[in-house]
Image: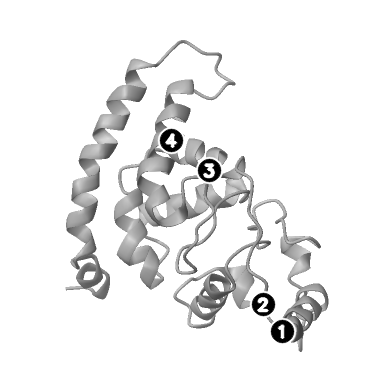
Amino acid sequence: MRNSEKMRGNHRRPAWRRLRGTLTAIGAAALALSTAVRADEPDPATQVYAQKIAITVCGTCHGAQGNSMQPKFPRLAGQNANYLAAQLKGFRAQTRGDPDAVGYMWGMASELDDDTVGALARYYAAQKPEPSAIGASALIARGREIYQNGFEGVPACSACHGTDAHGLQDFPRLAGQHAQYVLKQLASFQSNMRNVAVMHG
C-alpha cells in the first residue's frame, strides 16, 4: 500500500464521507436556482453552491470568509483566484503531495468540478483579508529585507509575490498569511513534498 493511501485511510476519511451528504443537499438546492445566463457570465447557481460549500464545509478550517484563526490552516480571503483554482485542481488530481494536502484536501476536492473550483476561487478572492498577528520586530525587519532583496543566491520574493505581497499573476498572496503556515510551506518546498519548479531554482 502506498504511503499516500495509508495517510488517506486515517480518521479523517469517515468525516469526509459524512460531508458528502451536505454537499449533495447543497448541490440540489443550487440546481433548483439555475437560470439561463449569458455564456460570459458566471452561473449564479454555481456561485450559490460554491458559497454554501465555502461557509458550511471549507469554513470549518478556513473560516466562513476565509480568515482562518488557526495557523495550521491557510487564510484564503483575498487570495489570487488563479492560484486558488490551481491548488484545488492539484488536490483533486492528487499531484500536490504535502501531508496536509493528502490528509485533508485530496478527499475534500475529489468531487469538485471545474466550474465549482472556479466559483470557490472567485468567492475567496472577493473576501476581505483581516490583519494578521504582529510578530517580533527584529524578525519582521529581517524577513522584509529577504523578501525585498533576496538572500545569498535566492531571488527577492517580491519579484513574484509583489512589493506589497499581494501576489502577481498566478503567484499567491502572502500578505496576512499565518507565519506558521508560510514556514511549513517553505519546509515542504525544501523537502520536495511540494514540487514547484520556481521554488527549487
Marks 1/3: CA–CA distance: 32 Å
Q: Residues within 10 Å of mark 1 (few under 14, many from 20)?
A: few
Colour scheme of the picture: one colour
Q: Residues within 10 Å of mark 2 (few under 14, many from 20)?
A: few
Q: Quadrant of residue 51?
A: top left
Q: Secondary structure at mark 3?
A: helix
Q: Secondary structure at mark 4?
A: helix
Q: Could you tell me which residue is drawn at 43 percent across and 35 percent down?
A: 50
Front in this rendered view, residue 118 or 133: 133
Marks 4/3: CA–CA distance: 9 Å
Q: Amino acid at mark 1?
A: Leu
Residue 142 location in percent, x, y?
76, 84
- The residue wearing badge 2 is 135
Q: In the figure, 14 relative to 148: above or below?
A: above
Q: Could you tell me which residue is drawn at 76 percent across and 74 percent down?
A: 147
- The residue wearing badge 3 is 121
